[in-house]
Amino acid sequence: MSTASPSFLQRLFGRADPKAGLMPLYHAVVAEGRQPHWYMEGAVPDTLDGRFDMIVAVLAQVLMRLEQQGATQESVWLTELFVDDMDGQLRQEGIGDVVVGKHIGRMMSALGGRISAYRAALAGEADMADALRRNLYRGAPVNDAALAHVEGALRVRWTRLGCLTRDAMLAGDLG
């Protein structure tokens, strides 16, 4: 039997989307990014952009941790789930097919830039408060207590992610 032909069970049940196994992790990232403390104590704007920015902050940390664990393919699939979700959200907001691609491109650019900024800050090569002011608050004024809350919570999240196994993370455990 050729390795290219599907097995009996694959033909019977269909091929599973490999991204589906990362849904628990993706849902955990989104749930963490929607926690009220970010918006109340952390003063992250409770807007579409603010929620996007907070979810991206958490997603960036998870993607960096997966990278450290050598989970390159899982990182790609998690990013694809994010893109699929954002595509659906844009369409739900009434954004048409012609413009969705441009919005997704900007979102992916934002994700890449934030991964770089947060990676440098977590490695001590840049100031986390500056990265948060620029990327999470988009340059808007934020009080020191709110900024300290978000920075502290993200640093705790990073430490917790560092204690997790790859399997635990992939199952949706964020510590």
Image (cartoon, rainbow, N blue to C red):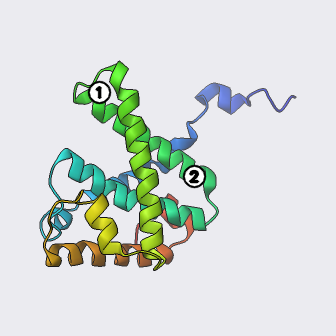
Q: Position of residue 127 (x, y in %)?
A: 37, 76
How far apart are labels 2 and 1 at the CA level? 26 Å
Residue 130 left/right relative to 62: left
Q: Residue at x 45, y 59 (%)?
A: 115
User: What element does badge 2 sit on?
Assistant: helix
Q: Is residue 45 visible?
A: yes
Please state which of the two labelled residues, at mark 2 or mark 1, is closer to the viewer: 1
Q: Residue at x 73, y 28 (%)?
A: 6
Quadrant including the C terminus: bottom left
Q: Residue at x 36, y 19 (%)?
A: 98
> Mark 1 = which residue?
91
Q: Residue at x 33, y 32 (%)?
A: 88
> Mark 2 = which residue?
74
Q: Residue furthest right?
A: 1
Q: Position of residue 123 (x, y in %)?
A: 49, 77
Within-10-Å neighbours for mark 2: few <14, some 14–19, many 20+: some
Q: Nearer the viewer, residue 148 or 130?
A: 130
Do tag 2 and tag 1 residues touch (Cβ < 8 Å)? no
Q: Position of residue 9 (x, y in %)?
A: 67, 32
Residue 105 vs 28, above or below: the answer is above
Task: Name the residue type under label 1.
Answer: Arg
Task: Name the residue type under label 2.
Answer: Glu
Within-10-Å neighbours for mark 1: few <14, some 14–19, many 20+: some
Quadrant including the N terminus: top right
User: What element does badge 1 sit on?
Assistant: helix
Q: Nearer the viewer, residue 57 or 164?
A: 57
Q: Position of residue 84 (x, y in %)?
A: 42, 36
Residue 120 vs 152, above or below: the answer is above
Q: Earlier in the sequence, mark 2 or mark 1?
A: 2
